[in-house]
Image: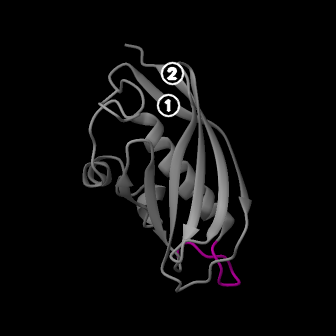
Amino acid sequence: MTQDSIFTVPVTPEEINESQIVEGQMARHLGIEITAVGADSMTASMPVDHRTIQRIGILHGGASLALAETVGSIAASYCVDREKYFIVGQEINANHLRAVRQGESAVHATATPLHLGRTSQVWDIKIRDDQGRLVCVSRFTVAVLEKRG
Protein backbone atom coordinates (compact mmCIF):
# COMPACT_ATOMS: atom_id res chain seq x y z
CA MET A 1 0.00 0.00 0.00
CA THR A 2 1.08 3.54 -0.59
CA GLN A 3 1.97 5.73 2.36
CA ASP A 4 -1.23 6.65 4.26
CA SER A 5 -3.50 5.09 1.62
CA ILE A 6 -5.48 1.88 1.18
CA PHE A 7 -4.54 1.85 -2.50
CA THR A 8 -1.48 -0.14 -3.59
CA VAL A 9 -0.34 2.45 -6.14
CA PRO A 10 -0.82 6.19 -6.47
CA VAL A 11 -3.65 6.86 -8.91
CA THR A 12 -5.58 9.90 -10.11
CA PRO A 13 -9.15 10.22 -11.34
CA GLU A 14 -7.80 11.17 -14.77
CA GLU A 15 -5.73 7.97 -15.03
CA ILE A 16 -8.70 5.84 -13.99
CA ASN A 17 -11.09 7.54 -16.40
CA GLU A 18 -8.67 6.94 -19.26
CA SER A 19 -7.86 3.31 -18.43
CA GLN A 20 -10.87 1.86 -16.56
CA ILE A 21 -13.94 3.62 -17.98
CA VAL A 22 -13.86 2.01 -21.42
CA GLU A 23 -15.76 3.19 -24.49
CA GLY A 24 -18.68 0.92 -25.32
CA GLN A 25 -19.03 -0.42 -21.78
CA MET A 26 -21.83 0.37 -19.31
CA ALA A 27 -19.99 2.93 -17.17
CA ARG A 28 -19.09 5.05 -20.21
CA HIS A 29 -22.61 4.70 -21.66
CA LEU A 30 -24.11 5.98 -18.39
CA GLY A 31 -21.65 8.88 -18.16
CA ILE A 32 -19.93 7.61 -15.01
CA GLU A 33 -16.61 9.26 -14.16
CA ILE A 34 -14.26 8.94 -11.21
CA THR A 35 -14.03 12.39 -9.63
CA ALA A 36 -11.88 11.90 -6.53
CA VAL A 37 -9.42 9.47 -4.96
CA GLY A 38 -8.82 9.92 -1.25
CA ALA A 39 -6.54 8.06 1.12
CA ASP A 40 -9.35 5.64 1.99
CA SER A 41 -12.12 6.33 -0.51
CA MET A 42 -13.00 6.78 -4.15
CA THR A 43 -15.82 8.90 -5.59
CA ALA A 44 -17.60 8.72 -8.93
CA SER A 45 -20.33 10.85 -10.48
CA MET A 46 -23.14 10.05 -12.90
CA PRO A 47 -25.55 12.44 -14.61
CA VAL A 48 -29.27 12.19 -13.99
CA ASP A 49 -30.36 12.40 -17.61
CA HIS A 50 -32.12 10.42 -20.36
CA ARG A 51 -29.64 7.54 -19.90
CA THR A 52 -30.18 7.04 -16.17
CA ILE A 53 -33.86 7.74 -15.46
CA GLN A 54 -36.92 5.54 -15.38
CA ARG A 55 -40.22 6.26 -17.14
CA ILE A 56 -41.50 8.74 -14.51
CA GLY A 57 -38.42 10.94 -14.84
CA ILE A 58 -36.50 9.97 -11.71
CA LEU A 59 -33.16 8.23 -11.25
CA HIS A 60 -33.46 4.52 -12.05
CA GLY A 61 -32.50 2.23 -9.16
CA GLY A 62 -30.54 0.04 -11.55
CA ALA A 63 -28.48 3.05 -12.61
CA SER A 64 -27.68 3.72 -8.94
CA LEU A 65 -26.51 0.12 -8.59
CA ALA A 66 -24.40 0.41 -11.74
CA LEU A 67 -22.77 3.54 -10.29
CA ALA A 68 -22.18 1.84 -6.92
CA GLU A 69 -20.73 -1.31 -8.47
CA THR A 70 -18.52 0.70 -10.82
CA VAL A 71 -16.89 2.83 -8.13
CA GLY A 72 -16.70 -0.13 -5.74
CA SER A 73 -15.09 -2.40 -8.32
CA ILE A 74 -12.53 0.15 -9.40
CA ALA A 75 -11.65 1.06 -5.81
CA ALA A 76 -11.36 -2.62 -4.86
CA SER A 77 -9.09 -3.32 -7.81
CA TYR A 78 -6.61 -0.70 -6.59
CA CYS A 79 -6.43 -2.34 -3.14
CA VAL A 80 -4.73 -5.47 -4.48
CA ASP A 81 -1.52 -6.16 -6.40
CA ARG A 82 -3.00 -5.80 -9.87
CA GLU A 83 -0.19 -7.89 -11.39
CA LYS A 84 -1.19 -10.92 -9.28
CA TYR A 85 -4.89 -10.48 -8.44
CA PHE A 86 -8.19 -9.33 -9.87
CA ILE A 87 -11.57 -8.76 -8.27
CA VAL A 88 -15.09 -9.83 -9.21
CA GLY A 89 -18.36 -8.72 -7.69
CA GLN A 90 -20.16 -11.28 -5.52
CA GLU A 91 -23.08 -9.38 -4.05
CA ILE A 92 -24.54 -5.90 -4.05
CA ASN A 93 -27.56 -4.48 -2.30
CA ALA A 94 -29.07 -1.04 -2.07
CA ASN A 95 -31.61 1.00 -0.21
CA HIS A 96 -33.05 3.82 -2.29
CA LEU A 97 -33.83 6.70 0.07
CA ARG A 98 -34.58 9.77 -2.03
CA ALA A 99 -35.75 10.37 -5.59
CA VAL A 100 -33.61 12.49 -7.89
CA ARG A 101 -35.39 14.06 -10.85
CA GLN A 102 -34.03 14.33 -14.36
CA GLY A 103 -32.17 17.59 -14.82
CA GLU A 104 -31.00 17.78 -11.19
CA SER A 105 -27.47 17.47 -12.57
CA ALA A 106 -25.69 14.43 -11.09
CA VAL A 107 -25.35 11.95 -8.27
CA HIS A 108 -22.07 11.18 -6.53
CA ALA A 109 -21.08 7.81 -5.06
CA THR A 110 -18.32 7.47 -2.48
CA ALA A 111 -16.94 4.01 -1.75
CA THR A 112 -15.14 3.29 1.52
CA PRO A 113 -13.99 -0.15 2.67
CA LEU A 114 -15.60 -2.00 5.55
CA HIS A 115 -13.28 -4.99 5.12
CA LEU A 116 -10.13 -5.46 3.03
CA GLY A 117 -9.29 -9.14 3.33
CA ARG A 118 -6.97 -11.48 1.48
CA THR A 119 -9.81 -13.20 -0.42
CA SER A 120 -12.71 -10.76 -0.11
CA GLN A 121 -13.53 -7.10 0.36
CA VAL A 122 -16.71 -5.39 1.54
CA TRP A 123 -17.43 -1.79 0.54
CA ASP A 124 -19.88 0.80 1.85
CA ILE A 125 -21.11 3.08 -0.92
CA LYS A 126 -23.14 6.20 -0.29
CA ILE A 127 -24.78 8.03 -3.19
CA ARG A 128 -25.67 11.69 -2.70
CA ASP A 129 -27.27 14.36 -4.85
CA ASP A 130 -25.66 17.70 -5.72
CA GLN A 131 -26.97 19.17 -2.45
CA GLY A 132 -25.27 16.41 -0.45
CA ARG A 133 -28.53 14.67 0.48
CA LEU A 134 -28.33 10.89 0.83
CA VAL A 135 -30.02 9.21 -2.15
CA CYS A 136 -28.95 5.57 -1.80
CA VAL A 137 -26.82 3.37 0.44
CA SER A 138 -25.24 0.23 -0.91
CA ARG A 139 -23.03 -2.59 0.34
CA PHE A 140 -20.83 -4.31 -2.22
CA THR A 141 -18.84 -7.53 -1.72
CA VAL A 142 -16.06 -8.67 -4.06
CA ALA A 143 -13.93 -11.77 -4.28
CA VAL A 144 -10.17 -11.33 -4.66
CA LEU A 145 -8.93 -13.92 -7.15
CA GLU A 146 -5.42 -14.89 -8.19
CA LYS A 147 -4.48 -14.45 -11.83
CA ARG A 148 -3.33 -17.65 -13.52
CA GLY A 149 -1.04 -18.10 -16.48
Q: Is residue 56 magenta?
A: yes
- Residue type at mark 2? Leu
Q: In this view, does 34 lie above or below 60?
A: above
The mark tally for this picture is 2
Amino acid at circle 1: Ile
The residue range painted magenta reads 51-59
- Give the position of the N terminus as an image quadrant: top left
Residue at the image position 69 percent from the left and 76 percent from the top: 99
Where residue 47 appears, as percent x and y from the top left, is: 48, 73
For residue 147, side relative to residue 115 (left or right): left
List x then y, in percent, for residue 26: 48, 57
Residue hosting label 1: 87
Label 1 residue SS: strand
Q: How crowded is mark 2: few (under 14 residues within 10 Å), some or many (20 or more)?
A: some
Left-right relation of 6 to 65: left
Circles 1 and 2: CB atoms closer than 8 Å: yes
x, y percentage for residue 13? 31, 53
Work out whether 75 lies above or below 64. above
The residue that appears at 35% across and 52% down in the rendered structure is: 22
Magenta segment: does it hold 63?
Answer: no
Which residue is tagged 2?
145
Find residue 98 and report its image quarter.
Answer: bottom right
Q: Where is residue 86 in the image (x, y as percent from the top left)?
A: 44, 28
Label ID, residue 115: none
